[in-house]
Image: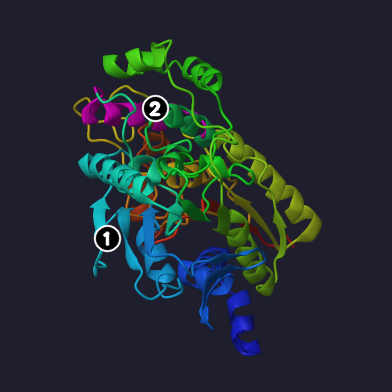
Amino acid sequence: MYPQLLRQRLVKNTLSTNARQIFSTALEDCSVQQAFSLKLRGEMTHGICALHLKGTLAFDLTHITKILIVAIGKAALAMLDAFLPICPIPAGCTLGGVVIAPSAALQPKPGFSYFTGGHPSPNRESFTGAQTALDLLASAASKDHGQTFCFFLISGGASAMMELPLDPDISLDDTISFHQALVGSGASISEINCIRKHFSAVKGGRLALAAGKMRHLSLLLSDVPAGQLDALSSGPTLADSTTIEDCRKILQKFSLPSQFAPSVQSFFASSQLPETPKPGDFQENIFLLLSSEDLEGAARRHAEYLGFTTFIDNTCDDWDYRDAAYYLLNRIRTLQLQHGRVCLLSAGEVTVQIPTSPAGLGSSQGSEAPGMGGRNLHFTLYCASRLKSDERITILSAGSDGIDGNSVAAGAVVDASTLDGVPDEALQALQSFDSFRLLNRLGATVFTGPTGNNLRDLRILLADSTD
């Protein structure tokens, strides 16, 4: 912990500086490396080779002759680097697998095939990586006699990074437009993932199904709401709790079929649309390494250290950004009156519905340049526009992966003075979904670079005494 003198200086910092400190410290405390070190332990003693999971059973690997690892998502590279030194590998055991990550590995591991998957839309390597993983699992399963073990290292973002339509006639371009329509629809992440699961050959439990009876364990870094782990990267190794009926209701709710390519429309309209694997179709073995609860817990500890009375409220998870802003601003105002120096934490994702007309965020249509930003930047800019000039309130919203939408920032931090002199520009930026350029010019953006982690977004609202 900090010496008392340094703590006093930190406490006296501006609310904006405090918010940035709370966010950065929470990220440090929830590093992938630290999570693996604290929660996994490899044993290789007296002829025993086992992997121990904190608080649960151990997995005996003594007689395993082949270990496969499929690492996918925004934290795939960090997870693999953290896991390999811990994983006990019996003498003579072969090691290999597939890695689908957002960037190329600086030091590729021998025996692994690497793919740079697209995000937020899939690319050609998303397709190739998914097919390679399916082929690897199917081949190993056909030859397995109880001596092969597969580890799935799963983090958020793999819904796009690893993709392969169930219908082989659906092209990559049609799949990209399908993903873009979902992201801009205003549907919650859980609703989007329900549709993705019923579209894909590797989601909704189908990746685990390809492993057959091979022993396997999924190690998860969650970027989904508590209790909805089958939505993480669209649940490639977990049985699906949603149904075809759920999927079709969501499609109609957001008028999505008309936005799909004809090949995708035909797929979802088919009476032969296959159902996803359900509980009991295969054995699930999962272990949660980190979630947004860990991120909030770390943020809370540091906020309290800085002298803030701290509250956690995730009520507005998956709400429209305007409703979430209204709710959280009213909540922090009430807490400020009751407690003075106060911190309100809220994890999860707000939704921003992007119009399909020209100049929407990520749009390639029309003569105007596409907007640059993401849900965190848009949310903070909107909040800044709703603050009164004399309010001593600061709002930070940022993604734990370090990248918000199509910008290079993680998010932004704003207060009542942020938009001084530029209210008209702020309104225009909101209307054109171009929040990054304005907030960056105003010095309000939060930069971390890609963190190699993904534990959802974190909103930090700070208020000081009105005395």
Q: Is residue 12 visible?
A: yes
Q: Residue at x 24, y 70 (%)?
A: 107
Residue 6 lies left or right of residue 202; in this view the side is: right
Dot 2 surroundings within 10 Å: few (below 14), some, or many (20 or more)?
Answer: many
Residue at the far right in the pictured view: 338
Element type where label 1 sits in the image? strand
Q: Is residue 264 above or below residue 28?
A: above
Dot 1 surroundings within 10 Å: few (below 14), some, or many (20 or more)?
Answer: some
Q: Closer to the camera, 165 or 194?
A: 165
Q: Position of residue 29 (x, y in %)?
A: 54, 71
**Mark 1, residue position:** 112
**Mark 2, residue position:** 199
Label 1 vs label 2: CA separation?
27 Å
Scheme by which the image is coloured: rainbow
Q: Position of residue 350 (x, y in %)?
A: 53, 40
Q: Residue at x 36, y 69 (%)?
A: 93
Q: Position of residue 394 (x, y in %)?
A: 57, 56
* First in sequence: mark 1 vs mark 2: 1
Q: Position of residue 188 (x, y in %)?
A: 52, 33
- Extent of the magenta region: 169-188
Q: Residue at x 26, y 35 (%)?
A: 370
Q: Main secondary structure of the magenta part?
A: helix
Q: Is residue 442 visible?
A: no
Residue at the far left in the pictured view: 367
